[in-house]
Image (spheres, coloured by chain):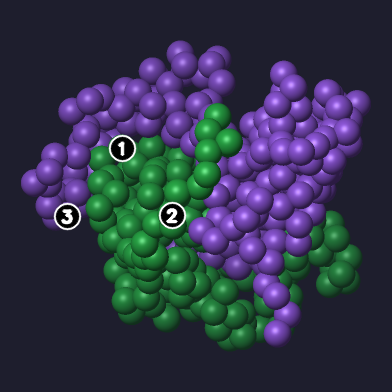
């Protein structure tokens, strides 16, 4: 029997602290179980913290990026084999975590390269007069089906989508900071579409690049056909 | 940049497969919340729930083959969580306090994550009024012992005794009600 250990354990649970272990008897174990259930039944309290999610994501990215080459899937591996071997995996994970620590200083690998937005059935559509887009200007456009920004790089036009790749909020251009900002979750993108800052558990994808051309003093983007009203 | 080129023809239309994840990040993003909630329901505190959740993903992701279906990946994560939780109790308390049961429901369903709210409601219902009130005030509403005492109109010392007895009785009811 360990009345003090039990009292302290329950008190820690109630204060949201990590409880200190002790050796409970059967009835004390039952009381701890009940205390845990009571505490866990508090509403809306069991969702993971955002910082925890980002931190674990970083640790996992470190582990997964140093995966040994023999971990590559063999063509004849069956699903059955996939689902075995937790303890061996746990041992491997411990080794991986210590390697991961050494790699923490380097920034996490940026996710997939930006894709190019190429509609199946599109046409070249005017987004600006050439004179509207001098060097160093981020010119917004909205064609209804797609919207984005066009600018000049070494005299040639480039265009990117103006919709956040996280949940689709419309980006605005913060000229003093030279970046596109999302009003929803503080994500920001460079004028080339790369993610600069985010506070999400997983970095959103870069902004898709659009096909763009300049003909006869007009800048055009290859965009989906507009639906003609019947 | 091939922006000046004319676009190529469209690719054939494909249905999205209903099983499988594209990469480990998708596995993580889609499952971390229910794994955390499942563990929180069984340890009752954030620090342990976070450590155990991290342990599950660090152990599970590397050997995972992405040819497994979503259902298989979730079953595997739940099985890993069961092992990790059992080891946690063995190492800290020397015995199993709570466990992750075998269930029919999908691991990310509310019934699988935790039956604590229903069980707790049943236990509280069976307790005398004062006992029920002190447990509600302390555990469910997160009041301090002082606040709870004044709410119940008793001294702090009395509230402590009340909480102690209420938890003993609740544990008897709770364990008696277990299969």
Between B38 and A115, the one nearer to me in the picture: A115
Using the image, name the chain to which the residue with label 2 belongs: B
Residue at 86% in and 27% down: A134
Up the image or down, B140 lies above or below B4; here it is below
Q: Position of residue B122 (x, y in %)?
A: 55, 83
Quarter holding the C terminus of chain B is bottom left
> Can residue B160 be seen in this snapshot?
no
State the SS at label 2: loop
The residue where tag 2 is placed is B9
Q: Colour of chain B?
A: green
The answer to whether the residues at label 2 and label 3 have Cβ atoms under 8 Å apart is: no
Q: Which chain is purple?
A: A
Mark 1 → mark 3, Cα distance in angstroms: 15 Å
Which residue position holds label 1?
B62
For the residues beneath circles 2 and 3, the answer to whether they share a chain is: no
Q: Residue furthest front?
A: A216
Quadrant location of the N terminus of chain B in the rendered image? top right
Label 1 SS: loop
Name the mark on residue A79: 3
């Amino acid at each position: 029997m360990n009345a003090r250990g039990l009292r302290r354990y329950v008190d820690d649970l109630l204060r949201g602290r990590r409880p200190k272990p002790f050796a409970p008897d059967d009835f004390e174990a039952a009381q701890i179980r009940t205390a845990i259930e009571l505490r866990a039944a508090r509403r809306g309290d069991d969702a993971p913290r955002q910082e925890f999610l980002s931190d674990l994501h970083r640790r996992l990215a470190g582990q997964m990026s140093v995966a040994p080459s023999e971990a590559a899937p063999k063509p004849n591996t069956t699903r059955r084999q996939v689902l075995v071997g937790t303890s061996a995996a746990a041992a491997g994970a411990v080794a991986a975590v210590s390697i991961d620590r050494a790699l923490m200083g380097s920034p996490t690998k940026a996710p997939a390269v930006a894709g190019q937005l190429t509609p199946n059935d599109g046409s070249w559509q005017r987004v600006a007069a050439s004179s509207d887009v001098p060097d160093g200007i981020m010119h917004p456009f909205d064609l209804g089906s797609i919207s984005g920004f066009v600018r000049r790089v070494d005299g040639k036009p480039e265009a990117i989508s103006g919709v956040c790749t996280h949940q689709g909020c419309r980006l605005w251009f913060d000229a003093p900071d030279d970046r596109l900002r999302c009003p929803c979750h503080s994500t920001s993108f460079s004028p080339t579409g790369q993610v600069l800052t985010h506070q999400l558990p997983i970095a959103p994808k870069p902004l898709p690049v659009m096909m763009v051309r300049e003909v006869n003093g007009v800048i055009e983007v290859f965009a989906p056909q507009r639906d003609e009203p019947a | 940049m091939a922006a000046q080129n004319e676009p190529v023809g469209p690719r054939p239309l494909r249905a999205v497969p209903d099983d499988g994840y594209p990469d480990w990040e998708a596995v993580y993003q889609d499952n971390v919340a229910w794994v955390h909630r499942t563990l929180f329901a069984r340890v009752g505190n954030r620090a342990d729930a976070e450590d155990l959740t991290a342990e599950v993903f660090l152990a599970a992701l590397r050997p995972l083959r992405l040819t497994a279906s979503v259902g298989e990946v979730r079953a595997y994560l739940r099985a890993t969580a069961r092992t990790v939780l059992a080891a946690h109790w063995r190492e800290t308390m020397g015995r199993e306090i709570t466990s992750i049961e075998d269930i029919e429901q999908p691991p990310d369903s509310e019934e699988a994550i935790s039956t604590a709210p229903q069980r707790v409601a049943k236990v509280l219902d069976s307790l005398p009024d004062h006992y029920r009130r002190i447990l509600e005030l302390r555990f469910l509403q997160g009041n301090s012992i002082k606040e709870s005492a004044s709410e119940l109109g008793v001294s702090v010392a009395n509230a402590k005794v009340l909480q102690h007895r209420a938890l003993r009785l609740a544990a008897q009811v709770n364990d008696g009600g277990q299969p």
